[in-house]
Image (spheres, rainbow, N blue to C red):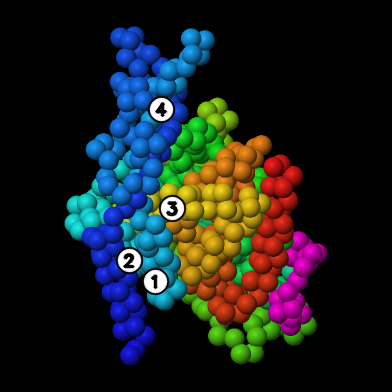
C-alpha cells in the first residue's frame, strides 16, 4: 500500500467515525451560566450589550428556569430550549442578579475529533489547506451538518470576522505589498539602509536584524524583503547563509507578535472569546487583552534578543552547527557547507518597476510612517489600534504617490493584482482556520476539556503544556495562524476554568500567561518547521540549504523556548 493510499484510508476511517458518532452517540448537555451587566432602557425594558449592540430580554425567575443548572447537569436528551434569561432575587437589601443560561453539548473525548483529524492530516500531508478542510469535514459530520457549503462554509465565511480578514489581509495588505513591489519603494528603502550602515559581518547582520524589526508586518513580507536585500552585501562580508537565514526567520513572526500594529490582533481576537469572562466580552476588549499580553510573550522577546546578540557576535548561546558554519565562512569564505543544496530564487531578486520609473526611499517611508502613526495613534486614543484605517491610508498614499510620479494606472493595478496573488493562499488558510475554530467550539471540545481537566491540572503546569502542544501542532502544520484557530478555542476556556476552580488570586494574569504560551508556542513551531512558508522563504531568499537552516535554527530557538517556559512557570507561581 502506497503512502498516498494509506493516508486516504486513514482519512476515510476518521470521517466515517465522525459520521457514526454524530448519528448514533447522544451528546452530553450542560448549562453555561453567565452573569449579565444589565441596564434599563427609557421604555423600562432590560437589556445588555453584546458585540456593541443592545440585546433586550425578559427574565424568568431562576426557580422556574427550564435550563436550571441542577436540572440540566450531564443529561443525554436535548433540553426544550437552548437559551434562557433568568433573575435571581436577593434579599431586600441586595440588587437582583441576572444571568444568561446557555445549553451546550459535547461528545466526550470525541468532541476533540475535528482538531485531532486536522493535526493528524498535518503530520501526514505536511500541507495546511487539506488538513484544515479535513478537520472541517470531520466536525460537520459529527454535528450532522451534511451540507458542507450551506450549513458550514457559507455561514462561517459570511461573518464580520471573515469580511475583516478579506479586507485587511487580502485587499489592503496584499495591495500595499504589490504597490511597493511595483514602485520599488521597499527595495529602495532597504538598499538605503544597507549601503549606509554595512561595514563588516557584524553590521551586515545588524542591518538584517534592524530591517526585520522595521518590516514588523512579519511573515513572508519580512523574509522576502530582508533576505533579498541584505544577502548580496552579507555575502561580500562572509556571513554564512545559515546565520543570515536564522536572523531573517527569527525576526519575522516573533517581531510581528511584539510590534503588533498589524493584522495579528484583529485575526486572533476572534478565537479568544470566553463566555462569562468580562475582560474578553467585546472585540475591543479582546484586542486590548492582546496588547496587555505582549510583555509576557517571552519566547518572542528572547528570540528577537537572541538574534540581536548573534548579530553583534555576543550570543548567550551558540549551537554547535551554527558556530561551525560561522567559523567556516569567516576562515574559508564558504557560505554553505560542502554537501549543501542551496535554494535559489532569482525571480525574487528582480524588480517589477516599470521602465523609466525611478523609485525613491520616501515612497516606502511615508506610507509606512502613516501606517505606524495611525495604528499607534488610534491605540493611544481609544485603546485599540484601527489597523484598517492604518493600512487603508498607507495603501492610498502609496498608490497616489505612484500615480503622481507618472506611473500609469495600468501598471499600478497590475502591481495591486500581483500583491493579491501573493497573499491569496494565506487568506484561504485564514478563512479555513476561522471555520475550523467555530466547528471545534460547536463540537464542544473546550467544554469537555474544561469539565475533565479544569480541576485536575496543577495551574502552574498549564502554560508550558499549552506551549508544547502548540509547538507540535505548528511544527507539523507549518502555520502559526492555523494553529491559533485550533488551539485558542480549547485553551482559553480551559485556562479560565483552571484559574477559577483552583482559586487563583489573579485569574486575568493567568489567562494572559496561557494566551502568551499559545502565541509563542505557535510562533516557535512555525519558525522551526521545514514546511513553513517563512522557513522556506528564509532559505530561498538567503540562498541557504533548507535543512541546514532548520538544523542550525532549532537549537537557538529551543533555548529561547526553554527560557520562556521557565518564565511562565515562575510568574504563575509568584502570582498565584
Contact between marks 2 and 3 (CB within 8 A): the answer is no
Query: Gap in Å between the C-alphas at discs 1 and 2?
Result: 7 Å
Label 4, residues with CA under 10 Å away: few <14, some 14-19, many ≥20: many
Query: Gap in Å between the C-alphas at discs 2 and 3?
Result: 21 Å
Query: Gap in Å between the C-alphas at discs 1 and 3?
Result: 23 Å
Closer to us: mark 1 or mark 3?
3
Name the residue rendered at 19%, 52% in the picture.
150
The residue where tag 1 is placed is: 121
Q: Earlier in the sequence, mark 1 or mark 3?
A: 1
Q: Quadrant of residue 11?
A: bottom left
Q: Is residue 125 above or below residue 82?
A: below
Q: Earlier in the sequence, mark 2 or mark 3?
A: 2
Q: Earlier in the sequence, mark 2 or mark 4?
A: 4
The residue where tag 2 is placed is: 134
The kind of secondary structure element at disc 4 is: strand
The kind of secondary structure element at disc 3 is: helix
Closer to us: mark 2 or mark 4?
4
Q: Quadrant of residue 21?
A: bottom left
The residue where tag 4 is placed is: 99
- Residue 66: numbered disc: none
The magenta segment:
308-329
The kind of secondary structure element at disc 2 is: helix
Q: Is residue 281 above or below residue 64?
A: below
What quarter of the picture does the C terminus occupy? top right
Query: Gap in Å between the C-alphas at discs 2 and 4?
Result: 37 Å
The residue where tag 3 is placed is: 448
Amino acid at each position: 500500500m502506497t503512502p498516498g493510499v494509506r493516508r486516504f484510508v486513514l482519512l476515510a476511517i476518521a470521517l466515517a467515525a465522525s459520521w457514526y458518532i454524530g448519528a448514533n452517540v447522544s451528546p452530553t448537555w450542560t448549562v453555561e451560566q453567565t452573569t449579565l451587566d444589565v441596564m434599563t432602557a427609557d421604555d423600562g425594558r432590560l437589556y445588555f450589550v453584546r458585540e456593541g449592540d443592545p440585546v433586550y430580554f425578559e427574565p424568568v425567575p431562576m426557580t422556574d428556569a427550564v435550563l436550571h443548572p441542577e436540572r440540566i447537569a450531564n443529561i443525554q436528551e436535548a433540553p426544550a430550549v437552548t437559551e434562557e434569561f433568568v433573575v435571581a432575587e436577593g434579599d431586600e437589601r441586595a440588587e437582583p442578579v441576572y444571568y444568561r443560561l446557555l445549553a451546550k453539548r459535547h461528545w466526550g473525548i470525541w468532541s476533540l475529533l475535528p482538531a485531532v483529524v486536522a493535526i493528524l492530516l498535518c503530520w501526514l500531508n505536511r500541507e495546511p489547506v487539506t488538513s484544515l478542510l479535513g478537520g472541517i469535514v470531520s466536525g460537520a459530520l459529527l454535528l450532522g451538518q451534511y451540507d458542507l457549503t450551506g450549513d458550514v462554509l457559507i455561514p462561517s465565511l459570511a461573518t464580520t470576522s471573515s469580511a475583516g480578514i478579506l479586507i485587511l489581509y487580502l485587499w489592503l495588505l496584499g495591495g500595499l505589498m504589490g504597490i511597493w513591489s511595483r514602485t520599488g519603494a521597499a527595495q529602495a528603502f532597504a538598499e538605503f539602509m544597507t549601503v549606509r550602515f554595512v561595514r563588516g559581518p557584524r553590521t551586515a547582520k545588524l542591518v538584517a536584524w534592524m530591517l526585520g524589526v522595521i518590516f514588523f508586518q512579519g511573515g513572508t513580507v519580512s523574509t522576502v524583503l530582508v533576505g533579498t536585500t541584505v544577502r548580496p552585501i552579507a555575502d561580500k562580508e562572509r556571513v554564512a547563509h545559515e546565520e543570515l537565514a536564522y536572523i531573517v526567520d527569527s525576526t519575522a513572526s516573533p517581531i510581528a507578535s511584539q510590534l503588533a500594529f498589524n493584522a495579528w490582533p484583529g485575526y486572533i481576537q476572534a478565537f479568544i472569546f470566553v463566555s462569562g469572562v468580562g475582560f474578553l466580552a467585546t472585540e475591543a476588549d479582546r484586542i486590548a487583552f492582546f496588547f496587555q499580553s505582549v510583555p509576557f510573550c517571552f519566547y518572542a522577546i528572547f528570540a528577537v534578543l537572541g538574534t540581536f546578540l548573534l548579530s553583534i557576535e555576543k550570543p548567550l548561546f551558540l549551537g554547535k552547527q551554527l558556530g561551525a558554519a560561522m567559523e567556516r565562512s569567516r576562515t574559508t569564505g564558504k557560505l554553505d557547507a560542502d554537501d549543501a543544496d542551496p535554494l535559489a530564487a532569482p525571480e525574487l531578486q528582480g524588480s517589477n518597476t516599470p521602465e523609466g520609473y525611478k523609485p525613491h526611499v520616501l515612497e516606502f517611508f511615508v506610507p509606512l510612517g502613516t501606517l505606524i502613526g495611525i495604528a499607534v495613534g488610534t491605540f493611544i486614543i481609544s485603546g485599540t489600534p484601527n489597523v484598517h484605517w492604518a493600512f487603508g491610508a498607507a495603501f492610498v498614499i502609496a498608490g497616489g504617490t505612484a500615480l503622481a510620479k507618472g506611473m500609469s494606472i495600468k501598471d499600478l493595478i497590475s502591481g495591486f493584482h500581483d500583491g493579491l496573488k501573493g497573499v491569496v493562499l494565506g487568506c484561504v488558510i485564514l478563512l479555513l482556520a476561522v471555520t475550523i475554530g467555530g466547528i471545534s467550539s460547536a463540537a464542544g471540545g473546550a467544554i469537555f476539556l474544561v469539565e475533565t481537566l479544569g480541576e485536575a491540572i496543577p495551574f502552574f503546569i498549564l502554560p508550558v503544556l499549552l506551549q508544547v502542544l502548540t509547538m507540535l501542532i505548528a511544527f507539523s502544520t507549518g502555520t502559526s495562524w492555523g494553529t491559533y484557530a485550533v488551539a485558542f478555542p480549547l485553551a482559553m476556556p480551559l485556562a479560565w476554568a483552571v484559574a477559577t476552580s483552583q482559586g487563583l488570586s489573579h485569574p486575568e494574569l493567568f489567562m494572559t500567561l496561557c494566551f502568551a504560551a499559545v502565541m509563542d508556542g505557535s510562533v516557535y513551531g512555525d519558525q522551526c518547521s521545514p514546511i513553513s512558508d517563512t522557513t522556506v522563504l528564509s532559505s530561498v531568499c538567503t540562498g541557504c540549504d533548507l535543512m541546514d537552516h532548520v538544523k542550525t535554527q532549532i537549537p537557538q530557538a529551543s533555548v529561547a523556548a526553554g527560557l520562556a517556559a521557565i518564565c511562565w512557570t515562575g510568574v504563575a507561581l509568584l502570582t498565584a
